[in-house]
Amino acid sequence: MEPTILIEWRNRTVGDVVAEDYRRAAIFKRFGIDFCCGGGLTVEAACERKGIDYQEVAQALLAFDSAGSGTTEPDPR
């Protein structure tokens, strides 16, 4: 069973994850996941569409947030 922290990304949309912290867009860009026009897909669906292992993306998001790069401040746009 995967850790709860990794499950939390599964059903959230890519757009919501990026809107919460725009710097997470770099992670999706690295994996070739569209966070703008394709931002309505869940993270899991976006991974499936690109043939990417969801666990890899979730781990990258977790590492980003754990490194102190996450923020709760809204996107300034």
Image: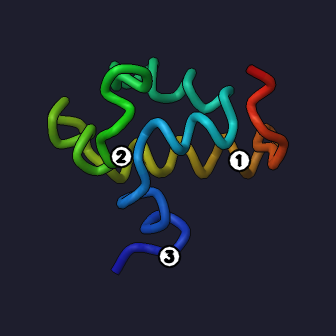
Residue occupying the far bottom of the picture: 1
> Residue at point 84% right, 42% down?
73
> Residue at point 33% right, 48% down?
42
- Which tag is nearer the camera, tag 3 or tag 2? 2
Tell me the amino acid under the disc marked 3. Answer: Thr
Tag 3–tag 2 contact (CB < 8 Å):
no
Which of the labelled discs sits on residue 40, or is there none?
Answer: none
Picture quarter with the C terminus: top right
Residue where numbered disc 2 is placed: 43
Query: Distance from label 3 to label 1 (Cα)?
Result: 15 Å
Tell me the amino acid under the disc marked 1. Answer: Asp
Residue 48 in the image, given as x and y percentages of width and height: 17, 42
Earlier-in-chain disc, 3 versus 1: 3
Tell me the amino acid under the disc marked 2. Answer: Val
25 on left or right of 57: right
Q: Secondary structure at mark 3?
A: helix
> Residue at point 36% right, 46% down?
43
Earlier-in-chain disc, 3 versus 2: 3
Of 64 and 49, the residue lying toward us: 49
Residue where numbered disc 1 is placed: 65
Residue 14 in the image, given as x and y percentages of width and height: 43, 39
Query: Distance from label 1 to label 2 (Cα)?
Result: 16 Å
Mark 3 neighbour class, 10 Å CA radius: few under 14, some 14 to 19, many 20 or more? few
Residue where numbered disc 3 is placed: 4
- Which tag is nearer the camera, tag 1 or tag 2? 2
19 on left or right of 27: right
43 on left or right of 23: left
